Amino acid sequence: MNLFYGRKLAIATKHHKEKVIAQKVASKLGVLPFVPSGLDTDQLGTFTGEIERILSPLEAARKKCEMAMDMAGCDLAIASEGSFGSHPSLIFVPGNEELVLLLDRKNNLEIIGKKLTIETNFDGRICYTVAELIDFTEKAGFPSHRLILRKDKDSKTVISKGIGDKNVLLEKFDWLMKHHGKAFVETDMRAHYNPTRMEIIAAATDNLIERALANCEKCQTPGFGITDVERGLKCSWCGMSTQSVKAYILSCTKCGYTKTEPFKNKTTEDPMYCDYCNP
């Protein structure tokens, strides 16, 4: 069942995410993607904090879709929302989770794709010297990955975004040093200025498409896929349950049908992941 073929699909983005979304959904789902002109998704919050983000990633993606559909006068939209911070499992490692939502008003359907990764340049630091600044640029992937400078981490007034030129970076850094004695440099995580993030959005889109092409075994509605996991894979040494995944829980967002599938090709866990053998 392809509920989407031949329909117009609004891509709710201000930061050129259509570059990694449009071709994928057009070729796999048969939709006609476009970006509504003048859509301002920044009103829902900015990465740099001038506008506070109060919605969850899912709520924000849903709101973007609704804004795009209302503006374009269509009933099908797609949007993404990114989250950055400590990886949920690797506490001291930065992580990036991208959520991509397909919202179908006509069929009252939501399909979600996700990708969680440590492949991110998300970072920021206080710099007092040009040497410290240059060291940061090298680790951040500058200039292909753009940067932000402000007087301190929480400043919402003295701030320069989207810096992709070394001379401009040094000029603005020099100004901040003269007026404030320091500068806070950080990676610009807006998608169109961060190629690494674009790759993760593309991967999350692939995950969404995979779900959109999978129909529920009971009602045949698209979107059947993994929604949760069952932990407790037993340790190969002591036999105690670990926190590792032993099964996936698949469900239908339409009728609620669920199915449990054991983790393939793995019946026990390595003792290094056991809280009893390796506390």
Image (spheres, rainbow, N blue to C red):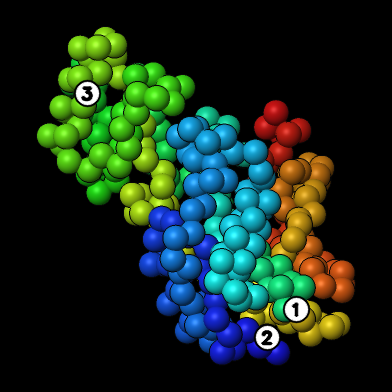
* SS type, badge 3: helix
In the rendered image, residue 275, in percent from the top left (x then y), is placed at 73, 34
Q: Which residue is mark 3?
A: 173
Residue at 16% over, 28% down: 170
- For this rendering, which residue is in front, 229 or 47? 47
Residue found at x 53% / y 46%: 43
Q: Secondary structure at mark 2?
A: loop
Q: Which residue is at the far left? A: 167
Q: Amino acid at mark 2?
A: Leu
The image shows residue 23 at horizontal and vertical percentages of 43, 77
> Which mark, residue 107?
1
Judge from the rendering whether residue 208 lies leftward or rightward of residue 226; answer left or right.
Answer: left
Residue 217, image x, y percentages: 81, 82
Figure check: 91 above or below 178: below
Does any portion of residue 61 appear in the rendered image? yes
Three-letter amino acid code at disc 1? Answer: Asn
Question: What amino acid is at disc 3?
Answer: Phe
Q: Residue at x 69, y 61 (%)?
A: 266
Mark 3 crowd level (few <14, some 14–19, many ≥20, 10 Å Cα):
many
Q: CA distance from mark 3 to mark 2?
A: 52 Å
- Work out how far the residue at label 1 is from the one at label 3, CA to CA, in angstroms: 52 Å
Reading the image, the residue beneath label 2 is: 3
Residue 145: give its label: none
Q: Is residue 166 left or right of residue 72?
A: left
Which mark's residue is nearer the viewer, 2 or 1? 1
